[in-house]
């Protein structure tokens, strides 16, 4: 196994506000953690540390509101921590908030080229993979349709198809696929199987125990904003079920 971890997380913490967001002064931003604390704020995650080796498949387990999706966004670089550090030593293909970033008035074809390019795919790669992206998304008849006229399911299919074509070594998957129809979900999961067989590193959030056992070998159990357990996925799921039931 590669000596360089794919992901290193050290004493990670992030804080949110329960009420609407207020402005922070320079004193808030550059002061210590205690000085920055404000009424109504809470720690969504705090003191979280772990290391992921290349090729590992990690399932993140926990109840709603325990920071699972927040952790994925921190690893993907979508959010910045208030405390600690996240080091990602390889490129990331983020399957989170899939429909974000698409331009409503551009066509499907234009959006494919735009989003693939923004994710770092070269022009020649986009040209080579364009037909496969459209075919996988099953929206060939809509390639010149403005994105805003697509259904939610079609938008998810398109986004998954683009991101799953990236060559990045780390795959981050949230439960975004839950909105799709079963046939397409099955196709997406088969695609994830293919990517894992290529040696990709997987970070996966799901409330579906069957999917967690299918894809993951190791689990991170988040509870109360802390990392309650880091162990083989079966042990983590047994602990979670014992704590909160199936």
Image: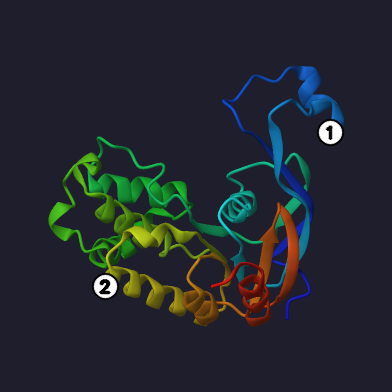
Rendering quarter of residue 235: bottom right
Q: Which residue is mark 2?
A: 183
Image position, residue 124 (x, y; %): 37, 58
Task: Give the residue at mark 1.
Answer: 33
For the C terminus, the image quarter is: bottom right
Element assignment for label 2 = helix
Q: Secondary structure at mark 1?
A: helix
Residue 141, numbered circle: none
Q: How many C-alpha atoms fall within 10 Å of the one at disc 1: few (<14), some, or many (≥20)? A: few
The numbered mark, 1 or 2, whose residue comes first in the sequence reads: 1
Q: How many marks?
A: 2
Residue found at x 71% / y 38%: 42
Image location (x, y in percent) of residue 177 = 38, 61
Evaluate whether residue 75 shows in this view. yes
* 10 Å crowding of disc 2: few (<14), some (14-19), many (20+): few
Q: Marks 1 and 2, Cα distance to the nearest angstrom?
A: 48 Å
Q: Position of residue 161 (x, y in %)?
A: 35, 62
* Residue 93 vertical position relative to residue 44 in the rendered view, above or below: below
Label 1 close to label 2 by CB (< 8 Å) = no
**Residue appearing at x 55%, y 55% in the figure:** 64
* Residue at screen point 52% across, 78% down: 215
């Amino acid at each position: 196994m590669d000596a360089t971890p794919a992901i290193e997380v050290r004493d990670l913490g992030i804080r949110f506000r329960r009420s609407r967001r207020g402005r922070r002064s320079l004193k808030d931003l550059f002061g210590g953690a205690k000085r920055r604390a404000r009424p109504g704020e809470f720690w969504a995650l705090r003191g979280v540390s772990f290391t992921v080796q290349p090729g590992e498949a990690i399932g993140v387990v926990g109840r709603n509101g325990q920071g699972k999706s927040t952790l994925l966004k921190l690893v993907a670089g979508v959010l910045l921590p208030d405390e600690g550090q996240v080091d990602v030593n390889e490129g990331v293909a983020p399957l989170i908030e899939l429909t974000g970033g698409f331009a409503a008035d551009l066509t499907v074809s234009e959006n494919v080229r735009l989003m693939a390019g923004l994710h770092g795919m070269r022009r020649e790669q986009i040209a080579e993979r364009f037909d496969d992206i459209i075919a996988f998304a099953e929206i060939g008849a809509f390639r010149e349709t403005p994105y805003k006229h697509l259904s939610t399911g079609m938008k998810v299919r398109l986004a998954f198809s683009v991101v799953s074509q990236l060559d990045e070594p780390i795959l981050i998957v949230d439960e975004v696929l839950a909105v799709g129809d079963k046939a397409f979900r099955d196709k997406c999961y088969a695609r994830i199987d293919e990517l894992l067989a290529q040696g990709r590193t997987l970070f996966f959030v799901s409330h579906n125990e069957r999917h967690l056992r299918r894809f993951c070998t190791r689990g991170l159990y988040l509870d109360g904003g802390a990392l309650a357990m880091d162990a083989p996925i079966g042990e983590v799921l047994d602990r979670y079920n014992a704590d909160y039931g199936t």
